Image (tube, rainbow, N blue to C red):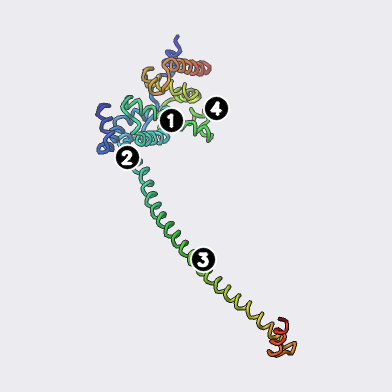
Amino acid sequence: MNEETYLKERVGKENPFRVPDGYFDTLASQVMARIDAEAQPQKKAKVISMHRVFYYAAAAVCALFVCATVYLSFNKESEAVEQQNMAVAEQPADNYFDEAADYMMLDNQAIYACLASDY
Amino acid sequence: MYTDEELTGLLQNPKTQRKAFEALVCQYGEQLYWVIRRMVLTHEDANDVLQNTYLKAWNGLSTFHGDAKLSTWLSRIAINESVDFLRRQKTHGALSCDEDLSVANSLMADNYFDGDETQALLQQAVASLPDVQRTVFQLRYFEDMKYSEMSQVLKTSEGSLKASYHIAVKKISEFFKSRD
């Protein structure tokens, strides 16, 4: 006997599976609802990402502004500091000369005479 | 009921696409359900796979150009989804076909299985086959699908399909003969 014939006689071809009542009547609406549900998250994601783009752009502009302000104010400070340093650097030299003159108990006339004799 | 040509035209027009797709679900839903149900066995799983099948079909509408029948295109997606589902089940260790009679026992306890023990054993034997033989056996034995159509659905030569079917029939026959 052909094996396929044996099987058909031994076990048959009946469909033993059952379906819940009304399943196929609601299938189309279930499928379309699923399609709509899958489509929605993509739309939401687009809206969020646009907001985020603006947020990041604004944050970048602010950061740039702050950096520029800090940089410029730092430059002014450093110029002022340099000027102060130069002024301070000049003072000690003058003070030192006067102290030296006092130590040697020389007055100005004596200092001029001493300088003139060298030439 | 629409012809394939009418439905294909309506599906390709954005204005009529949605309504046409609903008609597609109504027209082919039951046919696809049974192809899937015989593979995955439970109603819950068959419903999930069927929903996934239609979702894939919706997302892939632009790839369908009417060069095959709508039923062929949909059946191909349904069978691929069913096979993927079964492979994931095996990976997660659920419903292992290596265990003796686990499939038959699960079916006998299933409220949506009305078969007797013999029919449950038949499903056990089919579930133990490799994917291709299992698919071919179900399409040929239960659906009486012609090899020419099956060749288009599974994109396999008719000769290979016939060979797979005969091997499947032999294995299942031996399963029952060993129990007689």
Q: Position of residue A117 (x, y in %)?
A: 72, 84
| Residue in view at x 71 percent, y 81 percent | A119
**Looking at this view, is A67 or A41 the one in front?**
A67
Do tags 3 and 2 sit on the same chain?
Answer: yes
Q: Horizontally, is B158 left or right of B24 in the view? A: right
Residue identifier under label 3: A71
Q: Residue at x 43, y 19 (%)?
A: A11
Same chain for the residues under marks 4 and 1 in the image = yes
Q: Which residue is mark 4?
A: B98
Tell me the kind of residue under disc 4: Asp
- Which chain letter goes with mark 3? A
Chain ID for label 2? A
In percent of the image, x 39 and y 49: which residue is there? A45
C-alpha gap between disc 1 and disc 2: 20 Å
Q: CA distance from mark 4 to mark 3?
A: 73 Å
Q: Tell me whether circle 4 and circle 3 mark residues in contact (CB < 8 Å).
A: no
Check if mark 1's residue and mark 2's residue have beta carbons within 8 Å. Answer: no
Identified by mark 2, the residue type is: Met
Lower position in the chain sequence, tag 3 or tag 2: 2
- Quick one: label 4, few (<14), some, or many (20+) residues within 10 Å? few
Residues indicated by labels 4 and 3 sit on the same polypeptide chain: no
Label 4 is found on which chain of the structure? B
- Residue type beneath disc 3: Tyr
Q: Earlier in the sequence, mark 4 or mark 1?
A: 1
